[in-house]
Amino acid sequence: MRCPSTLALIPCLLVAGVAPTLRAQSADQPKPAGAATVEVTATRFPEDPVKVPASITVLTGRDLADRGATDLRSALALAAGINIAPGGDGGPASSIPEFWGLKEFDAFLLVVDGVPWGGAFNPALSTLDLENVERIEIQRGAAPVMYGATSFVGVIQVIHRHPADTEGSVRLSGGSHGSGGAAVTLRLPRWSKVESSLTADVAKQGYDDPRTAFKRGHVLWRNRAELGAGILRFDLDAAAVDQKPASPHPRVGKVLTTDVPLDANHNPDGAYLNDRRATFTLGWDQQAGAALWSTILSTSRSRQDLFRGFLVDVVTTDPNAHGYRERIETTDLYFDTHLAWTDLPGLKLVAGFDHLHGAGTGRGGDFDYVVNLDGSNAPGSGALPPAADIRIDDRRDFSGLYGFAEWSPMSRLVVEGGLRLNRTEETRRAFTLDFASATLDGGQDRRTVTRLSGSAGLTWTAWQSGADRVNLFASYRNTYKPGAIDFGLDSTPGILKPETAESYDLGAKSRLLDGRLDLELSTFLMDFSNLVVSQSLGGLPVLVNAGTERFQGMELSADWRLRTDWSLHGAYSYHDSRFRDYVQDFGGTATQLAGKRLEMSPYHLGALGLLYAPARGFTGSLEARYTGGIFMDKRNRAPYGGYTTLAAGLGYRAARWEVRVKGDNLRDRRDPVAESEMGDAQYYLLPGRRVTATVSYRF
């Protein structure tokens, strides 16, 4: 195995000389006594979320099945403070999560079975698959110790079932706009002491928008074997996603223009956004004295091919649109090894080292074209030769030594803290060959940063009676992240300044009514520097640093198990996200944006869900989601009012089979949910009403 850099020499030697490696989050570790659910994202060892000084939500696979949730937006629809915008520049199969009022494609960390999904670059949301999921863990706020320079406002970790816990199943679905899918999960026969499972699924989703759809195929092969004193795991995950992208709707002045039909698609004819991703993961867990030694090694290879365009001016003159043709290839390597002591009297410790390597290349060209405002008469690929040849190469290495301690000096008090020494190295090259002038422009840049990050927190049990309790918590986190790169054709070689943030949490968690009612209230404040935002420069989108910002607010959630089969879920959040010091040029005028709210960030988010889910018989669910008013622009001149969406499901469940009909966005709302970073002043709309019927069988 060839190491990616000098800093990776230590893990390479460990891998070569120790053993095959494995997932850090082992399902074989025992659950804390009396805990109904556990989390491992915040601590790397199983812990009751009510004891962790951070806002954490755990959704089980049963929770998702009862609600008919099959994508990230529906899965997290009732989680406090989280707003998942479907689609976006990543295509209709993708999404853009918002935490703490910040909706940026790289501000949160996506983890799948212990592996950063998207590696050293951006979360690979279009290839995320929720078949055969054991649980989803959502942590609000940064993870500066366990995952280092990768997250500011939240972590979403998807954990699939291990082979020994897998139940065979078959599922068929069909729905609106020619949508449909099939999935099969198998627990394979035991071979040579290896437990194995296989999950395979295909899906097709259509939309109201013309020439907009996606097809997805996914395979996950999981393996587990007890070898000597340890447990070996090796997994293969492969996904292929073919997308026909939609167009964002342009804004003219303060409002979304009516000169463009609601579902107009201004992409060139035959536009595509296709992703291929394969990930192979090895892991090893074993006892090392009083500690559990966990190691994971994962490598992935991805390729994205795109041919798409955006309306530049709401006019009919030629040209009025700009397009791109590009291939982006990335290779990621993730390594983590750590020791966890969980049986020491009143003390739990974690110490480890990790390394994240990413190498990516983007090569393509841009072109101008003309399209009717209703999206008709779009030219095809053969009529759109590129005006330039653009190549971008980027290589990133994130390394970290980290330590974490959880101390219980008394039964009612838990104090925790962690520190991490980070070292990041990045090299970037970008060159543009302009065909018209035959000139070559570009250059290269290099940046190395060595920096500490860390966290501290405490949880105090203010009251306890049997299973009921009220816990108060507070925490502080300090983190940073190298500036984002999306391999867009901006042809800029300069590496942006690292993003940095300090955040504070304060809140209360309670379990009441003999554990049937869970309440959580949290407040937060985060000061952010060098936020990466998109600007339009000469018709091309470019990423820049945006001075300083402040994010503050509160979040409230309630989960009440009314009776054996009935439950009520509610959530409310207030987010205040503002620029503190940022000057941007608008039409040649430098404008100070201090005090202005970040665009597309609502003050208020609310959710209410009622669920009836017996083991057998009729099932039903009803969910309402409120999104408050926003400003669509940085100068806060284009307000847009709040709205409410509804979803409902009805089904029948027998011992082995189940049928379900679910409707999403029943009010057929088409409100703006995400701003494009490639089309200036353009917004992706909420997909229209969708009805899906599903039949599943377990064996």
Image: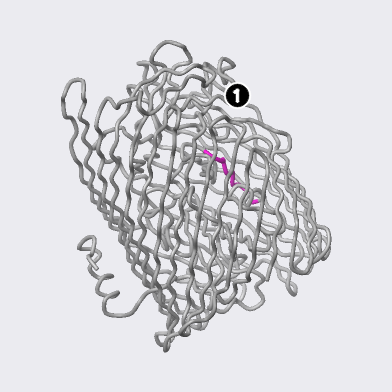
Query: How packed is label 1: few (under 14 Cα within 10 Å), some, or many (20 or more)?
Result: some
Instruction: Please identify the quarter of the rendering in which residue 389 is found.
Output: top left
Q: Is residue 435 left or right of residue 665?
A: left
Q: How far across and how far down the image is residue 413, in percent?
A: 58, 71
Q: How many marks?
A: 1
Residue 575 point in image, percent of width and height = 58, 40
x then y, percent, for residue 638:
55, 22
Q: Which residue is mark 1?
A: 262
Q: Residue at x 48, y 82 (%)?
A: 191
Examine the structure image and report whether residue 85 is included in the region drawn in magenta. Answer: yes
Residue 491: x, y in percent?
A: 27, 33
Magenta-highlighted residues: 79-87
Question: Up-down: is 488 above or below 345?
Answer: above
Decide: is 351 above or below 673. below
In the image, 274 versus 500, the foreground residue is 274
| Image quadrant occupied by the C terminus | bottom right
Q: Residue at x 21, y 26 (%)?
A: 434
Dot 1 amino acid type? Leu
Image height check: is 534 above or below 17? above
**SS category of the residue bearing label 1:** loop
Taking the image as shown, residue 590 lies to the left or right of residue 68, namely: left
Q: How is the image coloured?
A: one colour
- Furthest residue in direction front, as rendered: 382
- Judging depth in this view, the residue of 407 and 218 nearest the camera is 218
Q: Is residue 623 left or right of residue 439?
A: right
Quarter holding the N terminus is bottom left
* Among the 4 quarters of the image, the one containing residue 497: top left
Instruction: Residue 511: say if magenta.
Output: no
